[in-house]
Amino acid sequence: MVGPIRVETESYINPLLTTPNSHSQLHVSSFLPFSFLKINMKLLSLLLFSMLLLILCSIKHTSAACHVDDHAGLLAFKSGITHDPSGMLSSWKPGTDCCSWGGITCLDKIRVNTVWLTGNPDKPNGYLTGSISPSLVKVQNLDGIYFFDLNITGPFPDVLFRLPKLKYIYIENNKLSGPLPSDIGKMTQLYALSLSGNQFTGLIPSSIAELTQLSQLKLGNNLLTGPIPLGISKLTDLSFLSLQNNKLTGTIPDFLSSLTNLRILRLSHNKFSGKIPNSIASLAPNLAYLELGHNALTGTIPSFLGKFKALDTLDLSWNNFTETVPKSFGNLTKIFNLDLSHNSLVDPFPVMNVKGIESLDLSYNKFHLEKIPNWVTSSPIIYSLKLAKCGIKMNLNDWKPKETYFYDYIDLSYNEISGSPVWLMNKTDYLVGFWASGNKLKFDLGSLKIVGTLKNLELSRNLVYGKVPKSVSGLESLNLSYNHLCGQLPSTKFPASAFVGNDCLCGAPLPPCKVKGE
């Protein structure tokens, strides 16, 4: 029988850190069986080795590079970029963790799932030049590609078809060109497809109807032609449909009753003809933006538009609409932006019950408003007011708007407005444009404050007098012709047509001033 085991311990020192000949502070009685000691030493060594392995794994995990395929695919994409003047991809370096690169996000810090690159149009070097490399296919976990305001060229990238997890494509304001692929409908997993602001040509492929999971389809600002495919009616999850600024033709299809989730419908700046389809009435509960301007639409404005209680923006400008604006427009209490300009609409204009209009344009119709409407005058937030040729006959000094500070644009051209705009313009700090040609305004031009934001000033054919101030030289456009201005002109870039027809203006670009005594 083995006797009792006695272990005397003063302190513990790791046996792995002591040599066989060192004097350990671990005292084991001479009668401790060798087999017992051997087994416990093995267990202790195994335990310490496991702890060390866990530590190493932890260190490796915290500094782990992204997947090798993602790394290679992104570097191949970078190789397809021929010019990067702002260093947008400067952090994309071989041998570094691609999850830490600019514009890259990763799932679980290992697999790249989005690439987001945004240029800056306001900076001359804020872009990338090049094409999308087919090697991007190596980044198989990509679910989102976001390329905004770059300078990417080439046709529609075929590599997009070979990324099975791709759900969001936003390649906006680049220079992709050529036709959209006829089999674009194969990307049935897509939730959003935005190719706006490129140079795509040809028809919208009919196969686009197969992208039934789309919530956003944005193909605006291209060179697309032909009609809207009828199959778009199958995209019942759409909340955003944007086809504006193309060369699309035909009528607006009468299939919109199936797109009841639409909040934004943008079809402006095309060549659509015919009437506003009745099926648009089905969009009333949710539609916030309806933009049909700059087409060749005809007929009357349908009264059902007054049921669009969620409507924020309505643009029917530059069409051929006739007769009156429906009285039901008085129900559009939430509308902020209303543009009915450049049609053939007639009186009476309905009384609007809006809480505050931000932007209003009724210019160049056949209205005789007599005065600026009260619901405009009372708006606390208006920034753009355009009532050119609206039959307004009033003294501007009698107008008492609730708010003037936020005005950006004011166009009162070709009315019969008298008085002075000085008080109005001198109370605005953000004014960009003031147009009031063809009125009876009478004031000293020298008393006008030319704010730093002002770019456009047109006051031709009024009764303006005084001298032309030097401050007009900073404007982008100016027309002071046919007034009663006098004196030498300051140095400006404007042609003689901006100053002709005044009483006694002189100096370049007009004839030189006469020297006293001549």
Image (cartoon, grey):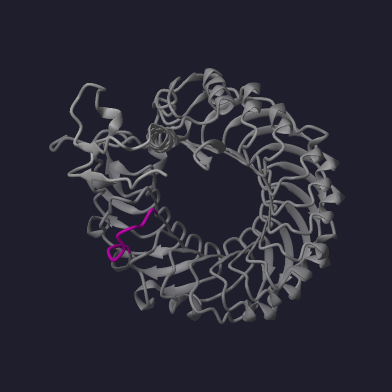
Observer able to see residue 371: no
Label total for image: 0
Please state, as top left, top right, bottom left or bottom right, where the C terminus lies in the image: top left
- Percent of width and height locating residue 403: 36, 73
Q: Nearer the viewer, residue 296 or 126?
A: 126
Residue at left 25%, top 57%? 449
Closest to the observer: 485 or 427? 427
Relative horizontal placement of residue 160, taking residue 452 as reference (left or right): right
The answer to whether one can see residue 77 in this image is yes
Q: Look at the image and give the residue range highlighted in magenta.
A: 425-432
- Residue situated in front as seen by the camera: 438 or 518: 438
Q: Is residue 142 left or right of residue 438?
A: right
Residue 76 location (% of width, % of height): 56, 20
- 108 in relation to 129, above or below: below
Is 426 inside the magenta-drawn segment?
A: yes
In which quadrant is the N terminus drawn? top left
In the picture as drawn, the residue positioned furthest to the left comes out as 517
Taking the image as shown, residue 419 lies to the left or right of residue 282, namely left
x, y percentage for residue 148?
Answer: 53, 38
- Depicted 39 relative to depicted 394: above or below: above
Query: Could you tell me which residue is drawn at 54 percent across and 78 percent down?
Result: 354
Q: Nearer the viewer, residue 379 or 42?
A: 42
Q: Please tell me whether the stretch drawn in magenta is mainly helix, strand or loop.
A: loop
Q: Quadrant of residue 134?
A: top right
Residue 440 in the magenta stretch? The answer is no
Q: Is residue 224 rendered to the left or right of residue 106?
A: right
